[in-house]
Amino acid sequence: MLTDTQVAKGNGRFFTNQTYHFETLRMMGYIPSGGADTGEILETVKLIAEGNSQSWFDAWSATVDRVTALAESTQDPTSKSDAYMRAHNYQRTGEFLLPPDDPKRVPSWTKTIDLFDKGLEAGSIRCERITVPYEGASLRALYLSGGSGSERKPLIVVVGGFDSILEELYFVIGVPAVQRGYSVLLYEGPGQGDALRTHGLPYIPEWERPNGAVLDEFLRTHAKPSSIVLVGMSMGGYFAPRAAAFDPRIDGVVAFDVCYDFGAGAAPILAAAASPLAANNPDVMWGYHNSLWTLGTKNLPDTQKAVKAFTLAPIADRIRQDVLILAGASDHFVPQNQAADFEKALVNARSVTMRTFDRLSGGAEHRQAGNLTVVYAAVFDWLLTKFGRS
């Protein structure tokens, strides 16, 4: 008879490597909003050679082909739309770990957007694509109406972070917000998605510039909402508070998760990138190569200098909105002290609410990857408390 110490138990991980495990968890988190499903994910990860980005891409590409075929052979519009949306998200995930200069990236990006648009069309999903003029180029935005009564609720504006695209935000916040009757405006700024790939725009610390351009264009063609709440995901935990500090049109801001000092979080990865052993570490090499691409830097010293500009410390006292800070107790990107540091720095905010998710909650990872339902409960309860029950 086996004793308790001899019984085989699950370890709660898909991969030993944190990057591969985290990106799989990230995908699992989109199941509630229709961006993935469990069986398809499990069948895919069984085929992946850990640490091999080409194996990662090939495995997800095979799943994309199967799920796309399902979409194309399905007559029910909702099921057809759902399958296209899952295929889109699997394509995005497959491309994610490729080197920035990999030739597969360009056709993969085109396919990613095409599958998403097919999902919108098949499901007759109410939305409006918006092209935002921005400093001689343009940014993409997507508006989702919350339907009747949404005009009495805040408009939720959402921006991603260090590695996200507009379409991913649809699953993160777009779907759950519309389900609750909120209208949502999703957008990409410099260093993200199409702005990076088509226009070559790198990240800038002065995020009030792209965020302001997005709000200007939206308000030019839409009625002014009762209030505006800006949500920033991942590195967006820097972008959103930074924009709010300089734009009184924003009434509330959510740091999802906290990113008080991006440079401090990036420092260990960039320091490790200097080692000859870094080439064998996917955590380090992906982070460094994505930094070069999104920041427009040429080498390690330039990158180490550039990331230091992305800190909220000099401007946190300018933030006067209601602020919600989210944090994961096991966040492997953001140092644990940053949530408390940010809270302490918000000396002029109208109110500050902080939620830290522990491991038992299932939301301890960076921006609660794997369990976004705890985020929904925290964010939408906070919205009700601060902006009323409509």
Image: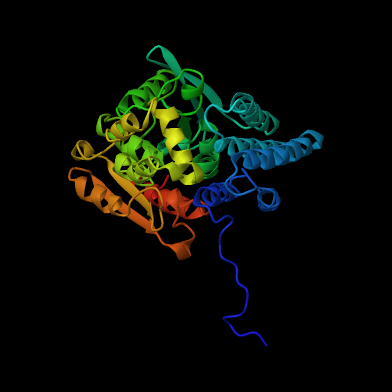
Pick the quarter of the image with the N terminus.
Answer: bottom right
| Percent of width and height locating residue 311 | 27, 38
**Residue at left offset 63%, top offset 74%:** 8
**Residue at left offset 37%, top offset 34%:** 226
Q: How is the image coloured?
A: rainbow
Q: Is residue 129 left or right of residue 158?
A: right
Residue in the foreground of this view, choosing between 52 and 311 = 52
Residue in the foreground of this view, choosing between 257 and 301 = 301
Q: Is residue 295 left or right of residue 199?
A: left
Position of residue 178 relative to residue 214, above or below, is below
**Res 76 seen here:** no
**Residue at left offset 46%, top offset 57%:** 363
Q: Looking at the rendering, which quadrant does residue 247 occupy?
A: top left
Residue at the bottom extreme? 1
Q: Looking at the rendering, which quadrant does residue 240 occupy?
A: top left
Position of residue 294 relative to residue 271, above or below, is above
Pick the quarter of the image with the C terminus.
Answer: top left
Q: Is residue 346 left or right of residue 133?
A: left
| Percent of width and height locating residue 104 | 62, 28
| Percent of width and height locating residue 164 | 49, 35
Residue in the foreground of this view, choosing between 319 and 16 = 16
**Residue at left offset 37%, top offset 37%:** 230
Q: Is residue 364 left or right of residue 129?
A: left
Residue at the top extreme? 136
Position of residue 256 relative to residue 223, above or below, is below
Position of residue 255 relative to residue 377, above or below, is above
Task: Give the total number of marks visible in the rendering.
Answer: 0
| Percent of width and height locating residue 179 | 55, 44
